[in-house]
Image: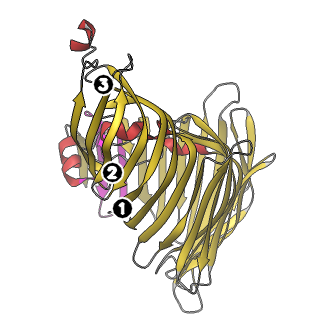
Amino acid sequence: MFTLNTRIKRVDKLNEFLGTGLTITEGSLLTGRFMSDRAEMVTGLRSDAITYAGTRLAKMNLSASVSGGKMVVELMADTLLLPDKSELGNFILGATSNTDTIDLGIRWDNQDGGRTIGEAKARGYFSLNEMNRSVLTVGILPSNFTVSHTPWHISPARVVIDSTSALFDNILLNSRTNYIRLDGKLSSAPEERLTLSFEGLNLAYLNSLKREKPGVQDDDRPEMPFGGIMKGNITLSDVYDELLFESNVHVSDFMLNNKGYGLLTVRSDWDPRKKVADIQVFNDFEGSRFFDISGSYTPSSKNADITASTYGMPLDILNPFLKTFASGLSGVGSGTVRLYGKLSQLVLTGSVMAQDASMKIDFLQSRYSFSDSIRFTPQGIAFRNIRFYDERKNQGTINGMLSHRSFKDMGISFDINMDKMLVLNTRPKDNE
């Protein structure tokens, strides 16, 4: 018999080096007992917190055993914090498997008067198909859960997975008029399609669904929160080769950077002759259009060619990209820009006429206004002989470049001419 009793100490540096994205609190206890003469194993893990890909288990206790060809796993946690910051309390996951079957169950109860409670159940079994290949069939059992006092129902469905394909047979979650449905098949055959359709989904839930990269701080990335209620469908096909993506999505009350844009429409259609996805995005704000985006994406080369036109669009959308040196950009812009190239090396060109624009230079604590054209070049955002004014209407001119590499590694190079203008407007507290 072999026994294991290990107290986990500092592993954050190792995880950061390996890029696992996994963090385990110091003091977590790993135990185990292995009996080779009876082919039995018992193991356990207790931890104050384990985090992976934005999901956090607090006060977690994991136990697992294998005996007589049967495996039993149970995971309990005081709370499960999901990437969208929602929380499931008293979370329990249980799994039992025999030679060719597996039963899975999940339960949670936040004990908040029925506001957040639920369960999900599934049963799977392994078999061989006509080509003697292993097949996993998972039957999703009917169950219910409640979110914010709103009941949801999980309908019976099945998933069939083998070495060449995955079939999703009418997986449906519905609540009153809101629903999520996944139906179709993914395989090497280009004609096979998987469709995700939905109605009543809150786009704001996606704001936190991003995986943190070790060593990268949030302050290094522009934050552009969005919101709205989604309705539509997304279809995937040819996932093993060029991954074709088609969509028809409408977002009502669409918001970006806390600014409303009305109804947003996103469409993409596959052009079989050119082998590109044609993309169209536009808004409708009480009969007015702020932007119109159209273009194409080529999956084989991962190249995009997108043209965007704006019509009196609020300039505050650029604030996240200027935060290294400025804040509070306001005004409206009209013009056309082109975004093209490989997804990892996108180039932005074109120009936008800024009207009644103003922004504060943070390290000077001074606000300046201007009405002129801002030009976008492969090297960055160019300012060419732009006249600007301080808060007392004194005039100056600016030439220079806000440089970037595919919107990263921002740099500033400005030549500013001014006479009797307010430059430094700091207060004692700004120097603290």
Q: Give how far apart the Cα atoms at labels 3 and 2 are.
A: 20 Å
Q: Residue most toward the top? A: 428
> Residue 166 or 314: which is nearer the viewer?
314
Q: Is residue 128 above or below residue 255?
A: below
Picture coordinates of residue 397 (x, y %)?
29, 34
Relative side of 154 to 3, left or right: right
Sequence-wise, the earlier of marks 1 and 3 is 1
Amino acid type shown at disc 2: Phe
Picture coordinates of residue 263 (x, y %)?
69, 47
Q: Residue most toward the right? A: 176
**Residue at image coords 26%, 45%:** 401
Q: Which residues are magenta?
A: 19-48
Amino acid type shown at disc 3: Asp
Local packing at callout 3 (Cα closer than 10 Å; few below 14, some 14-19, many 20+) is some
Q: Main secondary structure of the magenta part?
A: strand
Q: Give how far apart the Cα atoms at labels 1 and 3 are.
A: 28 Å
The numbered disc on residue 362 is 3
Label 3 SS: loop
The numbered disc on residue 417 is none
Q: Give how far apart the Cα atoms at labels 2 and 1 are.
A: 8 Å
Q: For mark 1, what is the residue? A: 346
Q: Is residue 287 magenta?
A: no
> Residue 11 or 70: which is nearer the viewer?
11
Q: Is residue 26 magenta?
A: yes
Sequence-wise, the earlier of marks 3 and 2 is 3
Which quarter of the figure has residue 398? top left
Q: For mark 2, what is the residue? A: 407
Picture coordinates of residue 319 (x, y %)?
41, 36
> Residue 382 or 247: which is nearer the viewer?
382
